[in-house]
Image (cartoon, rainbow, N blue to C red):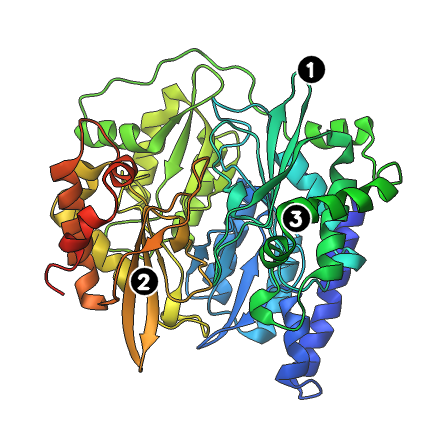
Amino acid sequence: MYQYDSYDHAMVADRIAEFRDQVARRLDGRLTEDQFKPLRLMNGVYLQLHAYMLRVAIPYGTLNSTQMRTLAGIARDYDKGYGHFTTRQNLQYNWPALVDIPDILDRLAAVEMHAIQTSGNCIRNVTADPFAGAAADELEDGRPWAEIIRQWSSFHPEFTFLPRKFKIAVNGAKADRAGIRVHDIGLQIVRNDAGETGFEVWVGGGQGRTPRLGHLIKPFLAPEDLLSYLTACLRVYNQHGRRDNLYKARIKILVEALGPDEYGRQVEDEWAVIREGELKLPAAEIARIRRFFDQPKQAEPTPVPVTENRAFARWLDRNRRDHAVEGLSSLVISLKPIGGTPGDITDAQMEAVADLAERFGFDEIRATPDQNLILPHVRNGDLEAVWNGLVEAGLATANAGLATDIVACPGLDYCNLANARSIPIAQAISTLLEAEGLSEKAGDVTIKIDGCINACGHHHVAHIGVLGVDKRGEEFYQITLGGAFGSDAAIGSIIGKGLAGEDVPAAIARLLHTYLDIRAENERFIDTLRRVGSDAFKEAIYADA
């Protein structure tokens, strides 16, 4: 993984010192909350319903055991003993005292972490395939490119105050596990007819109030032109994006208003002016960054163990993924215990993961867009030892990719933007589906829950989405069907009226029972839904409404 140089250390230290002074002035009253707000947001500090929240950046989702132990220590010393992994491969602390946040940032900086640009109208944390560098279907590791973008975008003077927040994702595999089509800019690594690798550039995707899928505006971009082309994309948006209406300020609205062809033409015009300038990436610099991301090249060709231990076998079946290197596997650590809070992890569990990564995982951990963790490189001979360690830590839930692997935003339990609770709904759904045996029977199904239209829980791109809304002071939940996050990206459709919260788990259970009744042999839920349409499930959902 990338290691800070002297510039990185100085940049982060200077920002912490500046913020420490700003916090002191807020605490003694020299700054009002309104004056302090834009300053704290630039440092990843939100004011939620009950307390300040600190969002820590985990660039492209990669961290090591030392960093994970530091996150655990901060949770223990400054929070309530846990952290929350988000859909943007970040970690949030929900209960830090404002006076302590500069000290927390110092502790993060000591292990080359920060909270810069995890909020505000800037280029946010750049995300990537959580299996990058390990996946068997990978063309090229996207993380070096995500790191290059991070270095270019941090404190970029032209793009610090964009019309709205801006999110970039990089994917280097055949399967799109980064969700490039629901990002402001998505970069897919491809190979052209000459055998050269470059990027497809997708622009104008996003979720929230007006969900849209991105448009392909550049079928092949040479690697050395990446930063100049991104600059042209951002410059057109920065010049023409709506600043008079918060709800129409995202680039997806601009691309839709201009049309993707016209937006692409304006980008090409701007790019022609700057393409051969200082932003052209030297081959030596690309090679230098790539060296930070060397992965295990070989291992003993030990096969995946065959075991009579049913619990271990079930966990291998659900949570193990094939690796590009023979003899290695990638492992999903589910942060979705049955009836638990999606994405939450205790300080002791963080330390357990750090220990396992250090002993068995080449000292590398990944955070995922679905609020889980991954050990990307584990020798097949060590799989049972890792599983035993996860069992001891309470982290061996064998449900990766199942209906109980639910994604949920913090909702009205924490967020002052939310209209409804998300966490209790997720817990109740998980508990009921497990009790009825539906999670295992239904197989690969994604359920994602949001407490407001901002869609931090990604309900738009779930096979089954749940959106909480407020109706005259009461919480109701709309069900969407047919969304998808990856290469077959789709925005789900609302299928009917909202349900009371207590009715949602049973409605989803009836929906899955219907799927099991009508599916073709070995047909996934999403394929059945696309074949028969949502009307086939509507009666089941509203049977008792």
Residue topped by disc 1: 194
| Label 3, label 1: how far apart the Cα atoms are | 39 Å
Check residue 112 in the rendering and tell me which mark sits there, or answer none. Answer: 3
Q: Residue furthest top?
A: 301
Amino acid type at image mark 3: Glu
Q: Quadrant of residue 500?
A: bottom left
Whether residue 300 is situated above or below residue 355 in the rendered picture: above
- Horizontal side of residue 106 vs 210, given as left or right: right
Q: Residue at x 79, y 54 (%)?
A: 10
- Horizontal side of residue 45 vs 527, given as left or right: right
Mark 1 is surrounded, within 10 Å at the Cα level, by few (under 14), some (14 to 19) or many (20 or more) other residues, namely few
Between 28 and 135, the one lying in front of the other is 135
Helix or strand or loop: what does disc 2 sit on? helix
Helix or strand or loop: what does disc 3 sit on? loop
Q: Quadrant of the N terminus?
A: top right
Between 159 and 341, the one lying in front of the other is 159
Picture coordinates of residue 399, whole percent (x, y)? 28, 40
Whether residue 508 is situated above or below residue 329 in the rendered picture: below
Q: Residue at x 62, y 57 (%)?
A: 257
Picture coordinates of residue 535, whole percent (x, y)? 21, 49
Check residue 262 in the rendering and tell me which mark sits there, or answer none. Answer: none
| Label 2, label 3: how far apart the Cα atoms are | 31 Å
Q: Which-is-in-front pick, marks 2 and 1?
A: 1
Amino acid type at image mark 2: Ile
